[in-house]
Amino acid sequence: MKIAVIGGGSWGTALAGLLAKKGHRTSLWVYEKEVVESIQRRHVNERYLPGVTLSPSLFASSHLEEVLLKAKWALLATPSHVAREILTRMRPLLADDTPLMIATKGIERNTLMLMSDVACDVLGRKGNQDIAVLSGPSFAQEVIQGHPTAVSLAAADMRLAARIQTAFSTPTFKLFLSQDVTGVQVGGALKNVIALAAGGSDGLGFGFNTKSVLMTRGLVEIARLGIAMGADINTFYGLSGMGDLFLTCSGTLSRNRKVGEEIGKGIPLSKILKRMQTVAEGVYTTEAAYALSQRHKVDMPIIREIHRVLFEDKPPRQAVMDLMKMARGNEIPLEVKR
C-alpha cells in the first residue's frame, strides 16, 4: 500500500520516515527542491530534521502528481495557513474515497475552520467522511529517533481509525483512538498559543510557579472553547489535550515556547519570525482562537492577553500582571461540580 505524505517539514518528514522504515511504500511531497534533492540523494532533510538518516526507500518529490499517483492513503502535514491551497491542488488527484489523515495543527484564520472542516469544504466530503486527525505530544525529532511516543487519532469512522492505528503503530510509536474529531483538533491547535505564554514567562525570568498557572488555567480555557464547539471534556485530559500542552509548554524543542521566550525578552515578533525556518503555528492560531472566543462568547483571558501582546504591542510583563489582577472566582465552575 502506498501512502502519500504532503508536507516536508519536520513533522511530515518524521511521519514519512516512520512509515517508510516500517515497510510502507511512502512518498513525500516537499515544497523546496533543495530539500527534495537532499532526501533523494543523501536520505537526510538537513533543513527541517537535521542529523537524522531516513530510509532509502522514502521517495521525495516537489510534484504532487508524482507523490499522489496510486496512493491509497494521503496524510496532510503542511502548515495550517497553506492547507486550503494545498488541498485544492490535491483534489483532482485524489479519489473521493481516499482516506485523508490530517497531522496539521491549527485553525484557518479567515474562516475559523478546523483543519478537518477545511478538508471537507475543499474535497466536498460530508461529516468527516474518510478523514482522521492525528495529534498529541510528539516532537518530530524524538519520534524519528525512536523515543517512546503516544498520540491521539480521531475519526468518525472507527474502522478507518483502527486501520490507521495498525499501519502507523511501531514498538515506540502508539496511537490511542478517539471519536472526538473536534476536541482533538482544538487541543492540538490551542496548546501552541498557551506555549507562547509559557515561553514568555520563561523569557521574563519567572519560575515554575508562574508557568504552572499558565498551563493549568490555559487548559481550562482550551476546554471551555472546545466544549462550546461541541467537544467532549474528557478529550482535554488526554494526549491531545493535557499531554500535548505539557510537552509544548515545557520542552526545549518547542518552537512556540521558544518564540514566546524571545518575546518575553523583548525581541519584536517580526524579527523573530523573519529568522525562523520553521512555522510557529501558535502565532497564526492566536488570532483565530481569539476570534472563536468572541464568536462563542467564551471567557479566555490568557488567550486575550497573548493576542494583545502579539498584535497590540502590549508589554508581556504587564500582560502577566493584568492576568494576576483578574484571577478570582471558583477554580471548578459550580455547574461542572453538579
Image: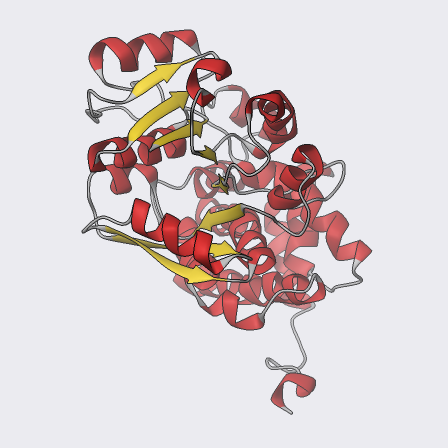
Indicate left or right for 239 with 293 as reference: left
Q: Depth check: 116 or 201 in front?
A: 116
Say above or below: 137 vs 94: below
Q: How many marks?
A: 0
Asked if one can make out residue 152 in the rendered structure from this viewpoint, the answer is: no
Query: Is residue 261 shown above or below 43?
Result: below
- In depth, the one of 269 and 40 nearer the eye is 40
Seen at 27% across and 33% down, the residue is 24
Residue drawn where x is 45% and y is 63% of the image: 242
* Residue under the point 73% across and 64% down: 299
Q: Provide residue 28's location: percent of width, then percent of height.
A: 38, 23
Here the colouring is secondary structure
The C terminus lies in quadrant: bottom right
- Residue 205: image x %, image y %? 44, 50
Residue 13, percent from left and from top: 35, 28
The answer to which image quadrant residue 97 occupies is top right
The percent position of residue 325, horizontal first and vertical second, equals: 67, 67
> Can residue 69 be seen by looking at this rendering?
yes
